[in-house]
Image: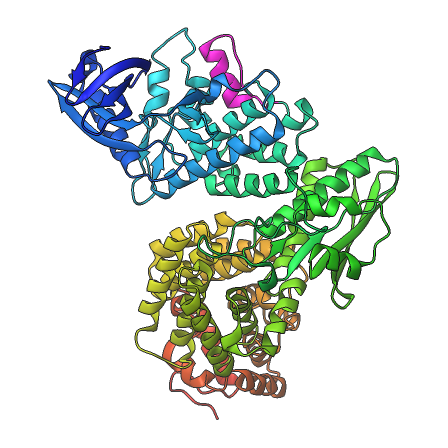
Amino acid sequence: MIGTTLAHYRITAALGAGGMGEVWKAEDTRLGRAVALKVLPEEFAADPQRLDRFEREARAVAALNHPNIVTIFSVEESEGIRFLTMELIDGQSLDKLIPEGGLAIETFFDLATPLAEAISAAHDKRVIHRDLKPSNVMVDDDGRVKVLDFGLAKLQRAEGVSDSSELATEALTGVGTIVGTVPYMSPEQVEGKPVDHRTDVFSLGVLLYEMATGARPFTGDSQPALMSSILRDVPRSVVEMRPEMPRHLGRIISRCLEKDRRDRYQTARDVFNELKALQSESSSDGGPSQGLPVPAAPSVSPPVSSSSQIRRRDVPWIAVLPFGCPAGDAEVEAFADGLEEDIASGLSRFSYLFVVARKSTRRYRGEAIDVRQVGEELGARYVMEGGIRRSGSRIRVGLNLIDAATGTHLWSETYDRDLDAADVFELQDELTDRVVATVADPHGALTRSMAIETESKPSEALTSHEAILRLFLYRQRVSAEDHLVTRTAVEGAAERDPNNAELLAALAGLCIEEANHDFNPRADPLQRALAFARQAVEADPASQLAHFYLAQTYFHSQNPGAFRSAANRALELNRRSTDTMAMIGIMFGYSGDWERGTRLVQQAMDLNPRHPGWYRFSPFMNAYRLGRDAEALEIAEQINMPEYWGDPLARTLAHAQLGNRQAAQAAARDLLRVWPDFEKDYKRVGLDPWVYSLPDLEARILEGLAKAGLSVRGVSTK
């Protein structure tokens, strides 16, 4: 076709060919620019399935607008030939750039991070690529990644369900041959099962593995053998093959390659966030200015908002220092290094925490330090330090969280484990889960310390970050006065930072409080909450707080399907956020799924046993609902949040049912102190709108309140 013309495009060279069509370089004679044409071959033009797939590619790519995804210009037809025009990429495909042994570390991250971001952007538009492989990734002459060939992409249905994998079916037709796409298929594609966006996460993992090692993770000398490898084999660790690679990279890739898609990263955004944080930590380009991490590129994942600029003076930073361990014990040293890395990465997943890059903290390894001096040198307000000791197969991990400005110890914990009896990676994951969940929780020592400082500032003077912390402080008290102060702070910050997803989510949460407690009421609070929550999700689809408050809004609006969808997404975004896990568990329980709700709350309590107590309100209600009143009282007395209404309410109900009338009335007075309008509000909305789906629980609550002398639902025993 070279030299021929289609419409006003003069074809000048062949670029390639594949199952979806031939690609040509052409000159757009009207605009005077070079473009790429993808032409559907004549022999396929009469095939409705091929035509449909070709047009689907056009729709899918046209819906995307991202610097790392090829731009489609138009879909055209000339003389019966269908073709699309797209930007011409001057460069090489990734399969020609990966050397034996894999890419250099810096090059790996320069390509892998934008690749993951591109796939994440496609998923945000409900586009699944389904054919990720090195030949579909171009690197232009400026080093920019461009993802090509969405020819097998499927637009996800709105409810998140996609049909069976056409790719697997097509691959199986070439009996006895290895189709080029097969090595990058997910297990569900190989088996011809329904696929969703997580199939791309697996394929991305295969790509990352090959980029890091120069070899594919799954091999076979025939198509059946290769497919069997994908379904059954566990590839060698990336770090085992290339010890110089960051340890956490091996875990990122291994998690992408989980056979069961439920065990993988649930979104490409999660992969991008992990790679971005690890890239920041591992980068050796340039150095900190005067010992400080570079403020323009903080090790933060994800940011509070894609539109917000995080300034060093606006937020308190946390530094995870190298843990002390016995000199010469290589196994413990490696364990300590991995634990430091995982904890720093885990903390950075919370949008309201900002973690100093590890490249700035490594220089303190093996040194005697003064935390105040280190905090000043690093620009960190908070410092986590620790030590690991070994006795035979037993190790003891001791960790401390310190306010570097004052030297005050905010939190400390000791963990004793058997190193020889455990998988090292699993042990690191377990300890990371516990440390991060306990420290980073909105009610934890670190966040609470930051939040309390916001009380000394006028509401109108709070930054976006401080306004979010004020919200967390409000959630520990819940009163009309605190609601007004918090609302003023959040609304003022949102006016100054209108595209901040976290602030929009906070506004949704405060509107829900207006509806539930009649605090400082305005018209249509749940409708306003829904509008704010949707804006928050749109501003940052990776914001857990946005999806959390969207779920809570749907819960209170009694929309069960939408609630479950948003709740599941919130859980996926950060499974170390025990606050989110527990609250969503309570909502699942009240919405009728008591078993799942109780399981989630218990999981949150196991991860964060130091939580002061509102988590326990759910197991309290479970015991109370079943008439196990002595057990319920025991749980109620473990709640240590006197300013949270659930604390005195639990004691009121348990004492009342046990016949402890004086104790019940004393607890009821505590309840009215922190929630003066409890009786009026309960008559209006109850504890939660969906509690009535559990009539046995509702009946026992009313009975207990009446026994304690509280007037609810128009019934008074006073």
Look at the picture and state if 711 lies above or below 542.
below
Q: Which of these two is toward me, 640 or 276?
A: 276
Q: Which image quarter holds the N terminus?
A: top left
Look at the picture and state if 175 lies above or below 481.
above
Kindly give the residue lying farthest to the left in the view shown. Answer: 79
Relative image position of residue 674 (x, y in whole percent): 55, 83
Tell me which corner region of the image, top left, top right, bottom left or bottom right, holds residue 162: top left
**Residue 245 visible somewhere in the drawing:** yes
Report the span colored magenta.
Answer: 217-235
Look at the picture and state if 456 lies above or below 330.
below
Q: Residue at 31%, 16% (x, y): give it.
A: 19
Relative image position of residue 71 (x, y in whole percent): 32, 33
Relative image position of residue 154 (x, y in whole percent): 31, 32
Q: Which of these two is toward me, 127 or 3?
A: 3
Is residue 128 shown left or right of residue 544?
left
Is residue 257 shown left or right of residue 85?
right
Q: Does the magenta stretch include residue 487?
A: no
Q: Does the magenta stretch include residue 230?
A: yes
Is residue 474 shown left or right of residue 688?
right
Kindly give the residue lying farthest to the top in the view shown. Answer: 176
Kindly give the residue lying farthest to the front in the view shown. Answer: 32
Q: Residue at 75%, 50% (x, y): give it.
A: 321
Q: Residue at 37%, 80% (x, y): give it.
A: 521
Relative image position of residue 225 (x, y in whole percent): 50, 12
Q: Which of these two is toward me, 650 or 576?
A: 576
